[in-house]
Image: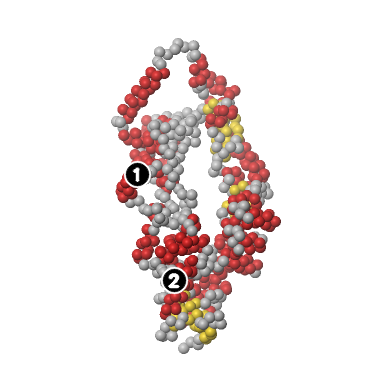
Amino acid sequence: MNTQTTIVAETAAEIIEYVPLADLYLSDLNPRQEVAEEGIALLADSITACGLIQNLAGLRDNAGKVGIVAGGRRLRALTIAVAERPDLATVPVRMAASTHVAEEWANAENTAREELDPVDEVRAYARMAEKALSIGKISQAFGVTEAHVRRRLALAGLPGPVLDALKSEEISMGQAKAMTVSEDHKKILEVLERAKSGWFNEYQIRSALKPDAVDGDNRKAQFVGQGAYEAEGGTVTQDLFEDETLFDNPDILNRLFAEKLEEEAGRLQEDEGWAWIMTSDDSNPFWYEMQRDHGFARVYKEEGVLSEDQSARHDALADQADNGPLDEAERAEFAALEAITEGAYSDQQTALAGAMVYVSHDGALSALRGLIKREDQDAAIATGVLEASQHDAGAASADKPKSPISQKLAADLACVATGARQHAALRDPDMILALLAFQLTGKAGYRRPFGLSASDVANLPSTDAAGYALDDRLTTPASTPKDPFGSDLARGFRAFKAKGMEHIMAELTRHLAALLTVEDEKLAGLIDKRVSTSIREVWTPTAENFFSRVGAAYLNSLWRELLDLPEDHATVTGFAKLKKGEKAEKLETLFADPAVRRALGLSDAQEAILAAWLPEGMG
């Protein structure tokens, strides 16, 4: 029989025995019967590096073996770690005096465990880093990800008073994280005093510490690129908590942006043959502004015409694409035919016109093409490249005899013409549906074929996608033409209709669904029954979208009700002692993690209640 050493703990009336690992097994009382193997591997690395920091707890059975009721993950990890640490072959176990006590320990260990204070964790990581331990080693020791260690070490680099303020809850974790964007301790301490007084939120802290920095998602930063920027001496700051890069030298970035834009503009002029080229610092120059500010006129691509054989081939490929993917050769052929229908600028047009080149919001090079300067417009009209404006034509015909058609009569005749079109349209329902889909998808721009207007129906909460996931068809925005004032709607509609009724009906369905709003309760109930509306299908309560936005007393009550426990139960009283943020996170985990629910021993009925639970007034 193996030798066992028994000692009496000085702090409590309890027995701690050193028991051979071979005599230990996972007790049926332990709620953690199933765990993630990856987590066990990380914990084994931690125990190998640091030893067993927290004792196991167990109950001796009639055969003299010890069933572990608290510390099941540690027990599993020990069986791995002992291969590298033979000294772990015998480990300390806190022994329960009875089955009742063992059950209480099991529940308390797995439901009311107190997490390491964040500031204590930060300082612990810092001490390990000072001993030249790598991030990988630290992550193994604590059983956390390397990204988590990097973020904690970023906090460790803050001045001591910041961590003290965080520890005493004078500032929030979010405010502390915001301060990591700077290494200037003097500035950080100045900002700290304002944050403690309640004047500075997270955004204001970042702005105060990096007032001139440019976000890496900025269009100029994307266009120039971080490599080119750093090659010219620019520096960056990595904000680990926001997963973003800050460009610290806007002067360098702006210079490189201007230089690259000029270079790309020259290349576009050479490739496309424009008479002149200009650049704009604007991210979205509008055509009407070009007319107002520069007096530009504009010409558009001359639409190509497909031969009879080409048109038949184009339609065949379009139909084939609707039913399945085209191969590489077919895609190339279809693209060539599409290019013909889209047209091209003629040599006469490019000889008189130019382009304005700019960088759009996403950092992509864009251009307004076909612009004709005021001084070149007479020549363009004379050569037939540009049509004379209706204003000029109206002035030239001012001396013509007055029309016998009054304005009221003209309006009536226009109504008749509209009615005739509507009357004929009834003969082609598919065309009407296609035209409606064409308008709803935004491809008609600002010119609406139907006398309908659609207001956005809000379906995105202020917390955005936190715990909320709609069908992609509801979140994919409509694609509007880049130049709705000058685009050829007839050509655009032909191309849209050529995609077939299946595509048209799919577009109608998603855009009309996104406009659905029902105020009548009976009608709403009928619709919900017909389509099986389920809020929990798309929404799960999280700390961000719900729990952090209600009071702590409400969270205490909700925790107790969901677990169906009395007020004096250790799980309930332990939960009540947590900070509000910790309560919110714990409830989020309860809803999101099946392993947590199994550890708490939820019944099938409780699982069903949890799966259907909604806040008051929502269901």
Q: Residue 520 carries which label?
A: 1
Query: Is 322 placed above or below 603 here?
Result: above
Q: Residue 574 carries which label?
A: none
Report crowding for label 1: few under 14, some 14 to 19, many 20 or more residues within 10 A (C-alpha). few
Q: Which amino acid does label 2 sit on?
A: His
Residue assigned mark 2? 569
- Front residue of this view, candidates 193 and 448: 193
In the figure, is residue 439 to the left or right of 261?
left
Query: Is 532 placed above or below 456 here?
Result: below
Where in the figure is residue 121, as x and y percent of width and height? 58, 66
Instruction: Assign a secondary structure to mark 2.
Output: loop
Instruction: Assign a secondary structure to mark 1.
Output: loop
Q: Can residue 553 be seen in this view?
A: yes
Q: Report the residue that reaches farthest toward the right.
A: 186
- Front residue of this view, candidates 551 and 381: 551
The first of marks 2 and 1 along the sequence is 1
Q: Can residue 342 be seen in this view?
A: no
Identify which residue is drawn at 37% across, 21% down: 412
Q: Which amino acid does label 1 sit on?
A: Asp
In the figure, is residue 352 to the left or right of 543?
right
- Residues under numbered marks 2 and 1 in contact, where contact means CB atoms less than 8 Å apart: no
